[in-house]
Image (spheres, rainbow, N blue to C red):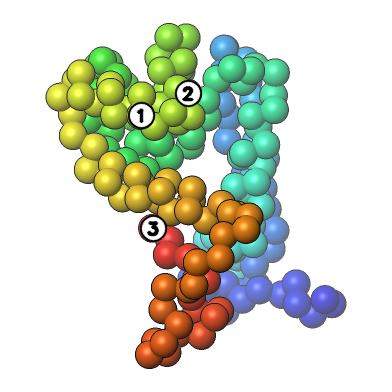
Amino acid sequence: MNKSTRHPCPVCRKGQLLPTTTHRDFHPRGTLVRVELLASVCDRCGKETIRSEQHDQNLRRLAARKSAPAYAGLLLGEEIAALRIRYGLTQQAASTLFGKGKIAFSRYENEVTYPDQSTTLLLRMAIDKPDSLQWLADQAGVPLPLWKERSEDRRRAIRKAPVSGASAPPPSSKGIKSSPSERHVRPRS
Ligand SMILES: [Zn+2]
């Protein structure tokens, strides 16, 4: 691990990357929550980049901010974005679905503002109980483009749950080339 700390600059390819830090500020309930983030700066061209290990570490640091007391009961912008993207909704469609103004989700996801208490409850319910999202979408007349895919994911997850004592033969014991390990590859969206 001695020489491995030298990282060539991907921009100019001549300099070396030196560690630096940056930060992102959030203001849940008007309280400053600052997350220190890792980055690299080239000692030659001065361009800032983020190496993949730094990116992973940054995602962990960002997720950890949720334990700040000011976030109690709130959702992170990333969690709101994840719900929306999971069902293939645009920010505008999600705003309509939850009965909010056009740019509400853009603001929630960037944490420019935080959803009010009742909207936060609806969002948390949609995350925990997908059927409630379907109901809200029906009320608002907003289609959920990836609803079918996500429903299939859930069915698959239920089927994967261990069943004791079941002794049905494997569905394809003959004539299929897949090895046992291949059969366990889980299709991921
Ligand atoms: Zn450089």
Give the amino acid type for the residue marked by disc 1 in the picture. Answer: Asp
Q: Is residue 138 left or right of residue 25?
A: left
Q: Nearer the viewer, residue 19 or 25?
A: 25
| Residue sitting at x 59%, y 63% | 51
Please give left or right for residue 144 compared with residue 165 in the image.
left
In the rendered structure, which disc, 1 or 2, sits on the residue that comes first in sequence? 2
Q: Classify 61 as above or below 50.
A: above
Q: In screen coordinates, is 176 left or right of 72?
A: left
Identify the residue at image location x=64%, y=25%.
33
Residue 169 rendering spot, x and y as whole percentages: 49, 72
Q: Which mark is residue 11?
A: none
Badge 3 amino acid: Ser
Please indicate whether residue 46 sits to the left or right of residue 68 in the image: left
Q: Tell me which label, 2 or 3, sits earlier in the chain.
A: 2
Tag 1 residue: 131
Please rate how many residues cluster around mark 2, counting C-alpha atoms within 10 Å: few if below 14, some from 14 to 19, many from 20: some
Q: Is mark 1 within 8 Å of ligand 1?
A: no
Identify whether 41 is placed above or below 130: below
Spot occupied by residue 129 in the image (x, y as percentages of width and height): 44, 28
Mark 3: is the Cβ under 8 angstroms from ligand 1?
no
Judging from the image, what secondary structure is the residue with disc 3 in?
A: loop
The quadrant of the picture occupied by the N terminus is: bottom right
